[in-house]
Image (cartoon, rainbow, N blue to C red):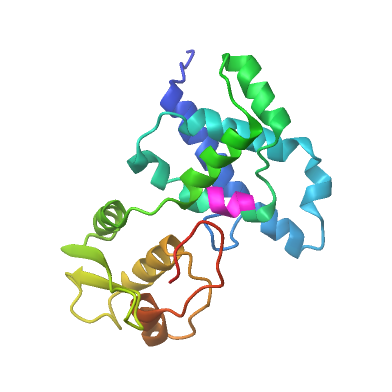
């Protein structure tokens, strides 16, 4: 029997492919594994694939609410960092021709970069709370005068050093804040969520 794919089905299929390619921000996609095997994935796929990725991501996310876009952020950043997302003027021209949109290369880059890097603490806290089955999870900015830039307020975890949900919380919070320094122990990891050192000015993001 024929199966009809809806727009949302196609969107989720593309997200699944993108996730398998670039991973979730933890260097866990086949793009990185190929490089670890001594190959150069950029040469294997050619120059056109990064432009195709940029075009399909634009198709998939245009007009979507922030709640939907946030689920794509880690993959968008990973694709950009890997060089697998390249919003060129030629890509914008292809999109404009296909959909009869007026879209410049600069607008395309601004859209994709904005989707990849926007911050919404309330929305992020809600997503992590539901995903990890927590009673409460809020991200609270501490202000410029404090050595701690953000505080994570958690309810439903009795012992953060033994609760199996803590590693997931640490990864989600640090990925959202674009923190890159690795932790070597559970205590250090949890402390870094609360008081991570400032990052090195990564594009479009806030310091950790």
At x 24%, y 58%, the residue is 129
Q: Quadrant of residue 148?
A: bottom left
> Is 153 left, or right, of 195 in this rendering?
left
* The furthest residue to the front: 145
How many numbered callouts? 0
Q: Pinpoint residue 29: horizontal percent, then vertical percent.
A: 61, 55
Q: Is residue 57 magenta?
A: no
29 and 59: which is toward the camera:
59
149 and 137: which is toward the camera:
149
At x 62%, y 20%, the residue is 96
Q: Pinpoint residue 45: horizontal percent, then vertical percent.
A: 78, 42
Q: Pinpoint residue 179: horizontal percent, then vertical percent.
A: 48, 70
Give the magenta-colored segment's residue range.
76-80
At x 20%, y 74%, the residue is 157
Q: Pinpoint residue 184: horizontal percent, then vertical percent.
A: 49, 85
Q: Quadrant of residue 109?
A: top right
At x 50%, y 48%, the residue is 116
Residue 136 to residue 84: above or below: below
Q: In which quarter of the image is residue 208?
A: bottom left
> Main SS of the magenta segment?
helix
Residue 42 to residue 3: above or below: below
112 and 175: which is toward the camera:
112
> Is 108 left, or right, of 161 in this rendering?
right
């Amino acid at each position: 029997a024929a199966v009809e794919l809806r727009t949302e089905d196609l969107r989720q299929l593309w997200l699944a492919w993108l996730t398998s390619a670039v991973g979730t921000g933890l260097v866990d996609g086949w793009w990185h594994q190929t490089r670890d095997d001594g190959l150069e994935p950029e040469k294997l796929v050619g120059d056109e694939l990064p432009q195709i990725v940029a075009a399909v991501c634009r198709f998939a996310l245009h007009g979507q609410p922030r709640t939907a876009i946030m689920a794509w952020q880690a993959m968008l950043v990973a694709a950009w960092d890997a060089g697998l997302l390249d919003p060129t003027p030629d890509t914008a021209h292809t999109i404009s021709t296909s959909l009869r949109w007026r879209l410049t290369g600069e607008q395309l880059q601004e859209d994709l970069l904005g989707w990849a890097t926007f911050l919404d603490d309330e929305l992020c806290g809600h997503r992590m709370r539901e995903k990890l089955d927590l009673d409460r999870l809020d991200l609270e900015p501490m202000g410029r005068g404090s050595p701690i830039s953000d505080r994570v307020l958690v309810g439903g975890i009795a012992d953060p050093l033994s609760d199996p949900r803590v590693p997931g919380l640490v990864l989600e919070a640090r990925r959202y804040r674009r923190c890159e320094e690795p932790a070597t122990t559970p205590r250090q990891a949890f402390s870094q969520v609360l008081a991570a050192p400032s990052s090195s000015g990564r594009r479009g993001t806030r310091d950790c």
